[in-house]
Image (cartoon, grey):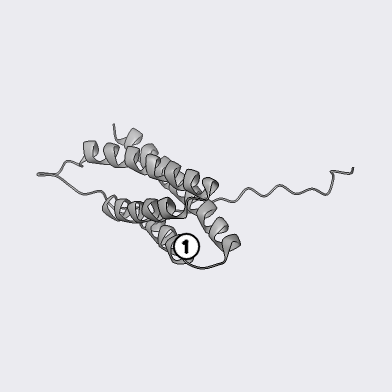
């Protein structure tokens, strides 16, 4: 086989973050953010596992959790893609759902990595 013409695609996502909620005074609410990051990691893992296992009722619950959590934590891109996946869940286009779930995981991971990078720079 000739592998010279094989192209590897590595999709990258550009994400936007909204400011985190503030507590009294001018301090950022970092304990809240750390808990939210852990919850989002668990939620993304649940989405991947649900999709891989074909458990669409669990996938729907995980998507709704991802939407709520990402709206609370200032991750609008995650919320947007999770809504797209949730909209496709009831349909019969499994290829589109697979693509959007994969994109959701990429956007989620990129958003969380960006949040962590920002928080490390502020310490």
Mark 1 Cα-neighbour bin, 10 Å: few <14, some 14–19, many ≥20:
some
Quadrant showing the C terminus: top left
> Is 22 situated left or right of 2 in this image?
left
Secondary structure of the residue carrying tag 1 is helix
Q: How far across and how far down the image is residue 1, in percent?
A: 90, 42
Residue 95's quadrant in the figure? bottom right
Q: Residue at x 39, y 38 (%)?
A: 117
Residue that lies at the very extreme toward the right in this rendered image: 1
Q: How far across and how far down the image is residue 55, in percent?
A: 48, 50
Q: How far across and how far down the image is residue 45, in percent?
A: 44, 41
Q: Residue at x 51, y 68 (%)?
A: 91
Visible residue check, residue 9: yes
Q: How far across and how far down the image is residue 13, in percent?
A: 51, 52
Visible residue check, residue 13: no
Residue position for label 1: 89
Observer-nearest of 36 and 42: 42
Observer-nearest of 59 and 85: 59
Q: Residue at x 54, y 52 (%)?
A: 102
Observer-nearest of 59 and 105: 59
């Amino acid at each position: 086989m000739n592998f010279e013409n094989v192209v590897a695609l590595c999709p990258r996502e550009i994400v936007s973050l909204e400011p985190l909620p503030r507590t009294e005074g001018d301090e950022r609410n970092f304990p809240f953010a750390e808990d939210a990051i852990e919850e989002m990691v668990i939620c993304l893992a649940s989405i991947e596992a649900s999709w891989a296992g074909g458990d669409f009722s669990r996938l729907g619950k995980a998507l709704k959790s991802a939407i709520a959590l990402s709206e609370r934590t200032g991750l609008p891109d995650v919320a947007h893609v999770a809504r797209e996946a949730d909209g496709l869940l009831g349909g019969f286009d499994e290829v589109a759902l697979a693509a959007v779930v994969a994109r959701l995981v990429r956007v989620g991971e990129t958003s969380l990595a960006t949040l962590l990078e920002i928080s490390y720079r502020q310490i």
